[in-house]
Image: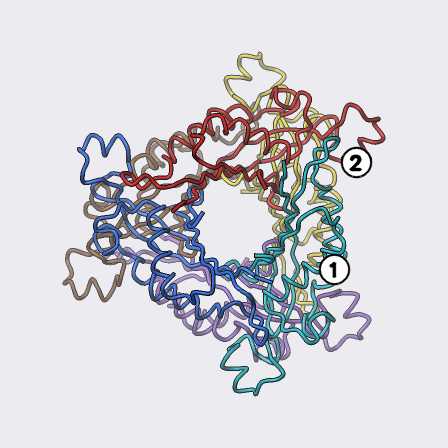
Chain colours: A blue, B cyan, C purple, D red, E yellow, F brown
Amino acid sequence: MKVAVFRKEHFNAAHRLHNPDWSEEKNTAVFGKCNNPSFHGHNYELIVKVIGEPDPETGYVCDMKILSDLIKEHVSDRFDHKNLNLDVPEFQSLNPTAENIAVVIYNILRDKVDAKLELKIRLYETERNFVEYPA
Amino acid sequence: MKVAVFRKEHFNAAHRLHNPDWSEEKNTAVFGKCNNPSFHGHNYELIVKVIGEPDPETGYVCDMKILSDLIKEHVSDRFDHKNLNLDVPEFQSLNPTAENIAVVIYNILRDKVDAKLELKIRLYETERNFVEYPA
Amino acid sequence: MKVAVFRKEHFNAAHRLHNPDWSEEKNTAVFGKCNNPSFHGHNYELIVKVIGEPDPETGYVCDMKILSDLIKEHVSDRFDHKNLNLDVPEFQSLNPTAENIAVVIYNILRDKVDAKLELKIRLYETERNFVEYPA
Amino acid sequence: MKVAVFRKEHFNAAHRLHNPDWSEEKNTAVFGKCNNPSFHGHNYELIVKVIGEPDPETGYVCDMKILSDLIKEHVSDRFDHKNLNLDVPEFQSLNPTAENIAVVIYNILRDKVDAKLELKIRLYETERNFVEYPA
Amino acid sequence: MKVAVFRKEHFNAAHRLHNPDWSEEKNTAVFGKCNNPSFHGHNYELIVKVIGEPDPETGYVCDMKILSDLIKEHVSDRFDHKNLNLDVPEFQSLNPTAENIAVVIYNILRDKVDAKLELKIRLYETERNFVEYPA
Amino acid sequence: MKVAVFRKEHFNAAHRLHNPDWSEEKNTAVFGKCNNPSFHGHNYELIVKVIGEPDPETGYVCDMKILSDLIKEHVSDRFDHKNLNLDVPEFQSLNPTAENIAVVIYNILRDKVDAKLELKIRLYETERNFVEYPA
């Protein structure tokens, strides 16, 4: 009798899409205006999904206050009002596409959330572009 | 060629999270402000998902008007403007967490919706906290 | 050159609409299911609007962090996860309709926000019912 | 390491639900006001989900600009500000229920999107009625 | 001490923008794809704003249930699942732009709502195009 | 018989709040994490309100397609995927607070929109922080 619970958080960050192994021309051709060297930014909306069996004593799959605090401590507070490329170590050599940000967040939280609970990340870069990992 | 159809309904209710087998201290420690003995409340948003093959004559998996009426009769009208703990028999001895409310709604509707159609419940307690059953 | 700034906060509360000077019949006739003696509840969304001239040194009409903290301290923390009728002194003898809640919030904040700034409250009881004060 | 990416587009169209093999009475009984012979309409919201492995050089499952242009060229531009029954060949003899529209969009895009990428369509007819294909 | 109350309703309708005094060329030039002779359609969201003094006995500016029923009877039920140009008398010789629809709705409701209450109409044709009357 | 029409557009940009006349300490104290020297960013939602009398021949206050193109050419295309501080001349010596961005957008559009039409700008920096000019 597994139930999924979802918690929505957010962070506002600057980023730039860029592959340092490519020429400027190729970067512009592939990433377009997302390659702007002075950066641009987004209000990222993050939804963390956790799947498990509700505890019969609490009726909780997990305590949403604890989940929210975990996300804030390990993700939002580290990404919010930051430049992902310059300020967040995980993206020093990883292109901060929505796909890669979702994978990074999954890996961060996978270590912190009880291993018996399944985990999935949905990340909205804009209202019209979003990603999910694992698919 | 299965298609999923979704219908969104809502109800506004009061509730309190509480485990009568625990001390007041433990209830406060675990449920925090959700344990307030005078209750608090939410605008619950309910999304019922039904999966099946569209009928070739109608192009419908199921008639959304009939599905909506079913949800209203058996869920919304019974839960709306109610105190879940005091007014809804299912929660007399079941803690009305979002997880448990979703399971209760699933069980209510499972009996009413054609057995050949799969069923899934998503319930928003707030815009930031929601659950899905079965996961 | 006046600019309006808006800050959105929320609180989840139980309430009941009731006029103690009326018979039970009249209360039921006028307030319908909102008169349920065991209470029901809502996710209230609160938007506080402040109008003034931006400070030329900061570019701010007012510091939104300070405004947000003010709303949390004096409104959200006092109303959130509460029963408005039982737990909030302002509604001991005032019917907690959306209209009255908005007026109460305005009066609370009017004392805390610099008098040279105009103030307006918008309160969503549900997505479909909301109020504004002053009109 | 598969990631899902989602792109949201929209189109505004008129339609009418009708089965030409049925009597007028049966059409009215089954489709109700959706059978209005002068048509009615909707703001359709379309979410296209594409699943695949991010390209290690770009960090993209697929280029969202290209995906968006594909949806616009083959779906939105053909359906937007159209009468689905009268103007769109796919619905000349297929009832334009949300279910059938989603299947048609899936079939259109399945030919255009790289076969190694999985595809799923979500279509909102209204905020309260929506469908997904494949389920 | 005036308070504004707002009630949101909706209707789904087909329409076409057209000026019968103009040539086909001019109609196409001015109204573009909105001039499609087979019609297109929208999910219209309607917000009715009513301003007045809360009744001291109820705490209501007006009973939202009564306001909602009024809007349903005189607007939503007459416009929903209709072709505005063909099925709604008010638009037989009036172009159903969002501006004109809002004015028509205002005039319908102005006769039904107590004259001592101010009235304003907001109408969303899409999430991105909307109008308000009176301005 | 004036009607207001509204058009919603968006742009995604990086920015930093900073007063060059102040010490680093004062900048940090006043602007907090918004002062991050590597910038952060937002999905800005822009709503342009235009008030006037509908043209009796079209039923339009103004052509929303033309208004949308105007906003795109003079605002969105210049601000989207840009760093407001580094890439947009208007903010070379003006702090890009939401208040100042709204005033800049108003001034840009005031020159382009017919002087007989009133103009108002609403700008969402996040879903919870937004501004309006003129107030």
Residue nearest the observer in this picture, C56 or A102: A102
Q: Residue at x 70, y 68 (%)?
A: B82
Report if the CB atoms under discs 1 and 2 are less than 8 Å apart: no
Answer left or right for F85 relative to E46.
left
Q: Quadrant of the N terminus of chain A?
A: bottom right
Residue receiving disc 1? B77
Answer left or right for D38 relative to D117.
right
Q: Position of residue F20 (x, y in %)?
A: 15, 55
Q: CA distance from mark 1 to mark 2?
A: 25 Å
Q: Quadrant of residue C95?
A: bottom right
Dot 2 amino acid type = Val
Check the image and report above or below for C68 versus D26.
Answer: below
Residue receiving disc 2? D30
Dot 1 amino acid type = Asp
Crowding at dot 1, Cα within 10 Å, few <14 / some 14-19 / many 20+, comes out as few
Answer left or right for B88 relative to A27.
right
At mark 2, the secondary structure is helix
